[in-house]
Amino acid sequence: MAKGSSSYSEFNRILEQLSQKQFAPVYLLHGEEYYFLEQLLAKIGESVLDETTKSFNHHVFYGKDSNVLDIMNVARRFPMMADYQLIEVKEAQHIRNADLIIPYLENPVASTILVWYHPGKKLAMNRKPGPSFKKHEIFHAQPVSEKEIIKVVTQYIQDKGYDIEPRPLHLLVDNSAGKFSVIVQELEKVFSNLEVGNKIREEHIEKFVGINKEYNIFSLQKALAKKDKANVVEIMTYFSNNLSSNPLPMVNAFLFSYFRKVAIMQSMARNTDKEIMSALGIPFFAINEFRQAATNYRGKAIQEVISALNDCDLKFKGIKENTGNERKLFEETMLRILSH
């Protein structure tokens, strides 16, 4: 049995097995990336249950309100007029005395499909009942890493029958803070307005997702890289007037990641563009911009920029003293970056 993974290929492997009616007697679905978990839970229900006998063979328990012994008693029953019954234990992270499920995990009933749904965090696999779950099908839905997100989103779009240009792809990913579940929600808006087979372009992201083509995180980063004060102020003003759609913590996190890559790039002066793009996850169309930023923020300047962004984060969180004015803090940070 699989030991669990958050990889997109592993997710698709389980989906394919379910489509072919290849069921494991026990599924542990746990982790932080809700999209994967919810899709697998829905697919299990769709694949296992027959609509005509669903009311007899579908049992849902909730962790806070359920007794493990009751779950096991139902699990050991036989399905009614069907090959399988499905038991979903939702919010399993809240269940008391979870280790009481161990005897069932050691000897499950073949006609029962038990789904232990444990979203939000990982089940501790080194403590009971973790080791017993290892004998069954596990999917650990970790957030897709920054290094993998572009590849995973590209594959997801292709699986849906579309293609996408590099710039709108990176714009979409950055605007969604790299969270796969958020990206999927945004892409649904595009898919519902674009016929299968089309290539997703920047104007589609602007129109259907609502990302401004001129005033976005890409344009802000580019203006800062060039030290184009007039452009920075123009974009800064737009962001300041639209903080609900451009929240300071998100913008600050993007810029921190951006300038951290600039700093790393400065240490890779002897590396080729291809090596730098691969190591830092920089798209080919942005490499010259990063080189410009690396030139304009040399030595102590890049340290001061990262310090300014770190101070912004601490002030926003109330760890460092500030006025409490989010707009003023954002503008102060941008001007502080430009001063170096």
Image (cartoon, rainbow, N blue to C red):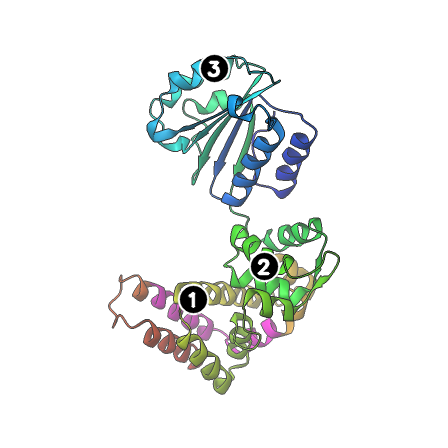
State whether residue 104 is above or below residue 277: above
Element type where label 2 sits in the image = helix
Q: What residue type is labelled 2?
A: Lys
Q: Which of 251 and 57 lies nearest the eye of the viewer?
A: 57
Please identify, in this view, whether the residue under mark 1 or under mark 3 is nearer the observer.
3
State whether residue 250 is above or below residue 229: above
Q: Residue at x 52, y 70 (%)?
A: 217
Which mark sits nearer the N-terminus, 2 or 3? 3
State whether residue 208 is above or below residue 87: below
Which residue is disc 2 drawn over? 189
Element type where label 3 sits in the image = helix
Which residue is disc 1 drawn over? 252
Q: What residue type is labelled 3?
A: Tyr
Q: Where is residue 261 in the image (x, y as percent from the top left)?
A: 54, 64
Which stretch is magenta?
289-313
Quadrant housing the C terminus: bottom left
Q: Position of residue 339 (x, y in %)?
A: 42, 82
For residue 303, say whether it is visible. yes
Which mark sits nearer the N-terminus, 1 or 3? 3
Q: Which residue is drawn at 47% across and 83% down?
A: 234
Q: Is 324 placed left or right of 253 in the picture?
A: left
Query: Would you say residue 292 sits in the magenta stretch?
Result: yes
Q: Position of residue 274 (x, y in %)?
A: 69, 62
For residue 340, say whether it is visible. no
Q: Where is residue 311 in the image (x, y as percent from the top left)?
A: 34, 67
Which residue is disc 3 drawn over? 104
Query: Would you say residue 70 sits in the magenta stretch?
Result: no
**Rendered image: mark on residue 55:** none
Please identify, in this view, whether the residue under mark 1 or under mark 2 is nearer the observer.
2
Q: Residue at x 24, y 68 (%)?
A: 321
Please identify, in this view, whether the residue under mark 2 or under mark 3 is nearer the observer.
2
